[in-house]
Image (cartoon, coloured by chain):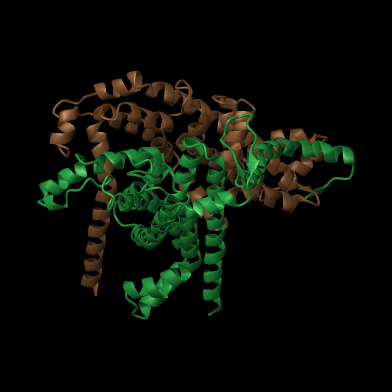
């Protein structure tokens, strides 16, 4: 009996290691190639580099404009996160705390956006951009990110606020605090866990998005990193070393965010999915 | 819940919801309504030129176009193969990791991490592996399988399959994490009781784990169907829909029709069809899981 169990365990381990190899191999290959020269990448794809070519990173970061794209993405994703945290928490405060006839209907109305695929609305969105002359307008891009991440954010924050204890608010109300003061000084601090969850997802969403920038950001100085990476590949598709370095730079930020907030990312994902 | 009496405070409180509502209306709701309108007109995208109403002709054009039919076939392949592999593999991964074996955190992080990467970067990463002179062909050479060497993303018989494979690779960790959360809700004593009754761990897996996870598994499949219909970035980064449009999905075809060839009406019609497919997928899989519950 005991022997059988350990036999099973060995099989499980072998399978796990094989799968792990399939996941690690492409990432390791990319990482290794990012510090090799072109010849090495093709002649010895699986060997360590003879001389570590840090120059690939310098090339990608400076000449291939990745530093600019990187900065653009930090600013665009950062602004999206801040606007979404403010706007969705304000809406969630009303939806979770005040009794109106249309409260439930309003929440459902906000959920409609989650069910409509992005591609369905691309043409009208690009029409709006054209009609109001918003090409290469970063605030407009951020507003679009905000709009498309609002349903998820409002859902998570509203559900969280519904569970927050009301006694502090009631005390503040008796003390004569206005609703804005209650929102700002009582509600907001208590909602930080939910706000940090949505902020991580919203940041990743904006960092990883290419569809909207593809539609209306054609100024190289404004492009975000995921699109900049594609651009780099389109322009200099055979500069393999620097391209691999650019891939590593692009995935480094989501990777670091995941490693720092592992529990939050996995927990938020599971909670969001189970609740649906 | 606070019931507001005076209309003045009511209006004040409403101000809180106004920013969200305004952004949402302008960039979500109006475009959703607009997409129906644009799917019924002919418009070349030039600002100032008037769209012309042509009824359902964009839809008829789409269904008569071999490119669109091909993209639907590709989508069907993407959905079916993803569903066959994603949830079962994710379930096995989750069960293995849930044993808390040595290094389980590392395994979990490794399987999950591709899901937080931009799909364009994932697509490019694999593009360089599968290109004709890429490392996958080099690997085949090394292990003596030179006769299998193929330009994976160029050859019409392998291009779509290769993209489907990368989609499975990039998404499986997502379902693994969800199933893992479900596994922790199964009480330990159920397994203990089964072990006392002499049930092997394989039997426990089929008799306890799968039945108790059924709602979560069917939800994973539903999310997978909708997610696979919406794949865009991967194809865009790896082949751009090529060679000769053979790897187009409705999403990439929609993008190309509207923004490359300026057929905005046709693009919108395809967009509406994508939405209808998602709705049918949702309703259909709900129907199937509900019927199973009755039996």
| Quadrant occupied by the N terminus of chain A | bottom left
Tell me the quarter of the picture where residue B286 sits. Answer: bottom right
Q: Which residue is drawn at 41% across and 33% down?
A: A253
Q: Left or right: where does residue A86 sit relative to residue B143? A: right
Q: Position of residue B146 (x, y in %)?
A: 12, 50
Q: Is residue B272 visible?
A: no
Q: Where is residue A173 in the image (x, y as percent from the top left)?
A: 80, 39
Q: Residue reaching furthest right? A: B6
A185 and A35: which one is in front? Answer: A35
Q: Position of residue A231 (x, y in %)?
A: 38, 29
Give the colour in which the image draws chain B: green
B177 and B40: which one is in front? Answer: B40
Q: Residue at x 59, y 38 (%)?
A: B43
Q: Which residue is drawn at 15% across and 29% down?
A: A39
Work out whether A228 lies above or below B270: above
Work out whether A178 lies above or below B92: above
Work out whether B44 lies above or below B94: above
Work out whether B166 lies above or below B52: below
Tell me the quarter of the picture where residue B151 sits. Answer: top left
| Quadrant occupied by the C terminus of chain A | bottom right
Q: Residue reaching furthest top? A: A63
Q: What chain is colored brown?
A: A
Q: Which residue is drawn at 64% across and 27% down?
A: A132
Q: Where is residue B9 in the image (x, y as percent from the top left)?
A: 85, 38
Q: Is residue A267 visible?
A: yes
């Amino acid at each position: 009996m005991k022997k059988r169990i350990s036999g099973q365990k060995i099989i499980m381990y072998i399978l796990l290691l094989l799968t792990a190899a399939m996941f690690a191999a492409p990432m390791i290959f990319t990482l290794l190639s990012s510090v090799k020269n072109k010849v090495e990448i093709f002649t010895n794809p699986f060997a360590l580099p003879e001389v570590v070519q840090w120059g690939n990173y310098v090339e990608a970061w400076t000449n291939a404009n990745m530093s600019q794209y990187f900065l653009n993405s930090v600013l665009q994703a950062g602004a999206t996160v801040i606007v979404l945290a403010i706007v969705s928490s304000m809406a969630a405060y009303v939806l979770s705390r005040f009794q109106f006839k249309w409260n439930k209907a309003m929440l459902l109305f906000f959920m409609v956006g989650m069910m409509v695929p992005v591609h369905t609305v691309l043409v009208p969105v690009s029409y709006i951009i054209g009609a109001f002359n918003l090409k290469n307008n970063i605030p407009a891009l951020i507003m679009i990110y905000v709009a498309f991440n609002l349903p998820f954010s409002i859902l998570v924050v509203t559900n969280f606020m519904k569970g927050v204890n009301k006694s502090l608010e009631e005390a503040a109300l008796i003390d004569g605090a206005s609703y804005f003061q209650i929102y700002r000084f009582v509600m907001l601090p208590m909602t930080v866990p939910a706000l940090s969850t949505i902020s991580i997802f919203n940041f990743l969403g904006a960092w990883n998005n290419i569809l909207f920038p593809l539609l209306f950001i054609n100024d190289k100085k404004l492009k975000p990193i995921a699109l900049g990476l594609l651009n780099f590949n389109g322009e200099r598709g055979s500069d393999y070393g620097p391209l691999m370095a650019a891939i590593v730079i692009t995935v480094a930020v989501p990777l670091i965010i995941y490693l720092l907030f592992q529990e939050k990312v996995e927990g938020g994902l599971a909670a969001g999915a189970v609740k649906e | 819940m606070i019931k507001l009496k005076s209309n003045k405070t009511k209006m004040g409180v409403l101000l809180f919801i106004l920013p969200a509502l305004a952004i949402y209306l302008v960039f979500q709701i109006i475009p959703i309504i607009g997409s129906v309108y644009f799917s019924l007109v002919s418009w070349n995208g030039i600002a100032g030129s008037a769209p012309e109403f042509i009824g359902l002709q964009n839809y008829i054009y789409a269904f008569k176009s071999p490119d669109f039919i091909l993209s639907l076939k590709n989508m069907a392949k993407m959905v079916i193969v993803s569903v066959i592999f994603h949830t079962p593999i994710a379930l096995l991964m989750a069960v293995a990791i849930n044993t808390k074996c040595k290094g389980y955190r590392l395994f979990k992080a490794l399987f999950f991490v591709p899901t937080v990467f931009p799909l364009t970067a994932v697509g490019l990463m694999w593009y360089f592996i599968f290109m004709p002179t890429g490392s996958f062909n080099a690997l085949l050479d090394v292990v003596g399988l030179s006769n299998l060497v193929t330009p994976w993303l160029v050859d019409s018989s392998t291009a779509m399959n290769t993209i489907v494979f990368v989609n499975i690779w990039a998404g499986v960790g997502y379902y693994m994490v969800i199933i893992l959360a479900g596994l922790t809700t199964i009480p330990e004593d159920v397994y203990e009781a089964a072990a006392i009754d002499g049930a092997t761990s394989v039997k426990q897996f089929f008799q306890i784990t799968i039945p108790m996870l059924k709602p979560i598994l069917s939800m994973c499949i539903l999310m997978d169907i909708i997610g696979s219909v919406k794949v865009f970035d991967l194809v865009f980064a790896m082949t751009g829909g090529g060679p000769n449009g053979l790897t187009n999905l409705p999403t990439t075809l929609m993008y190309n029709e509207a923004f490359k060839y300026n057929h905005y009406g046709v693009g919108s019609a395809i967009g509406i069809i994508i939405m209808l497919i998602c709705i049918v997928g949702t309703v259909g899989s709900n129907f199937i899981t509900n019927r199973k519950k009755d039996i």
